[in-house]
């Protein structure tokens, strides 16, 4: 595809259930980022991948959150035992590792925990 | 650790008035700095980067290493500038992109 693709676009889940959010980055982009955007809040960093490894996962809010990336491409963010405070838009972005290159964002997954 | 500060959550200006969105960063080396914008119902996109020294949609931003600032400016605000603006910092090719908390710009008639 031409851009970063995230699925699903919207997800409504019951409190306590697990959810998986998917990100398809732009082909050839080695860097991949997950951010969370809550209502009235800014962009909260979650995790950063270089290839398949995650040198910085300092933004994951709790051990209920995990992410993986396989084949240097697709990434999955998993939230276990969802809570209402997990409701937010989850954004994925990818970029090359060249100097001053921009990050391209997906359209986001809006997660609502009821 | 790198940090980006955008002190204003909301900036409201009249159409035609000058705009300045503030951004300060903490990093002792040579940073890469960006401004991203998110218009209503659109995805986040790059507005400009400091290395390009370009003007995009009338916006400019100058890196001031002495003040560790990268403020975004436009001499005459337009209604279509209303959006959420994020300042971002990267400290090298192998580092993460760190965003500020964002400033919502509201341009009114």
Image (cartoon, grey):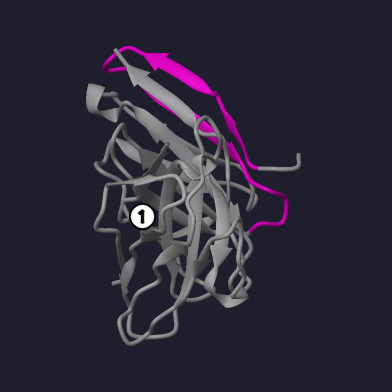
Could you tell me which residue is drawn at 43 percent across and 62 percent down?
A: B88
Q: Is residue A103 visible?
A: no
Residue projecting furthest to the right? A1
Could you tell me which residue is drawn at 59 percent across and 47 percent down?
A: A70
Q: Left or right: where does residue A87 sit relative to residue A53?
A: left
Q: Is residue B86 visible?
A: yes
Q: Left or right: where does residue A37 sit relative to residue A84?
A: right
Q: Considering only vertical position in the picture, is B57 above or below A2?
A: below
Q: For mark 1, what is the residue? A: A57
Q: Position of residue A75 (x, y in %)?
A: 55, 42
Q: How many marks?
A: 1
Q: Considering only vertical position in the picture, is B94 above or below B106?
A: below
- The magenta span reads A4-29
Q: Position of residue A97 (x, y in %)?
A: 60, 68
Q: Which residue is more in the foreground, A110 or B103? A: B103
Q: What element does badge 1 sit on?
A: loop
Quadrant holding the N terminus of chain B: bottom left
Q: Chain of mark 1?
A: A
Q: Position of residue A94 (x, y in %)?
A: 58, 52
Q: Which residue is more in the foreground, A9 or B37? A: B37
Give yes or no for residue A20 being in the magenta stretch: yes
Q: Left or right: where does residue A17 sit relative to residue A51?
A: left
Other residues around mark 1 within 10 Å, as few (<14) / some (14–19) / many (≥20):
some
Could you tell me which residue is drawn at 34 percent across and 65 percent down?
A: B23
Q: Which residue is more in the foreground, B80 or B26? A: B80
């Amino acid at each position: 595809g031409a851009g970063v693709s995230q699925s699903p676009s919207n997800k409504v889940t019951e409190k306590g259930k697990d959810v998986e959010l998917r990100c398809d980055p732009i082909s050839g982009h080695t860097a991949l980022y997950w951010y969370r955007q809550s209502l009235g809040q800014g962009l909260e960093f979650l995790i950063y991948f270089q290839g398949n490894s995650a040198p910085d996962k300092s933004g994951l809010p709790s051990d209920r959150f995990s992410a993986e990336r396989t084949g240097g491409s697709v990434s999955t963010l998993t939230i276990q035992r969802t809570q209402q405070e997990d409701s937010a838009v989850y954004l994925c972005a990818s970029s090359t590792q060249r100097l001053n290159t921009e990050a391209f964002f997906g359209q986001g997954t809006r997660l609502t925990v009821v | 650790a790198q940090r980006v500060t955008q002190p204003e959550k909301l900036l409201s200006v009249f159409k035609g008035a000058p705009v300045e969105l503030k951004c300060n960063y903490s990093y002792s080396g040579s940073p890469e700095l960006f401004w991203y914008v998110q218009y209503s119902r659109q995805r986040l996109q790059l507005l400009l980067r400091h290395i390009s020294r370009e003007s995009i949609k009338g916006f400019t931003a100058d890196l001031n290493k002495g003040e560790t600032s990268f403020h975004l400016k436009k001499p005459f605000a337009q209604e279509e500038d209303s959006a959420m603006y994020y300042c971002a910092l990267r400290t090298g090719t192998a580092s993460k992109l760190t965003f500020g908390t964002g400033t919502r710009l509201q341009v009114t008639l």
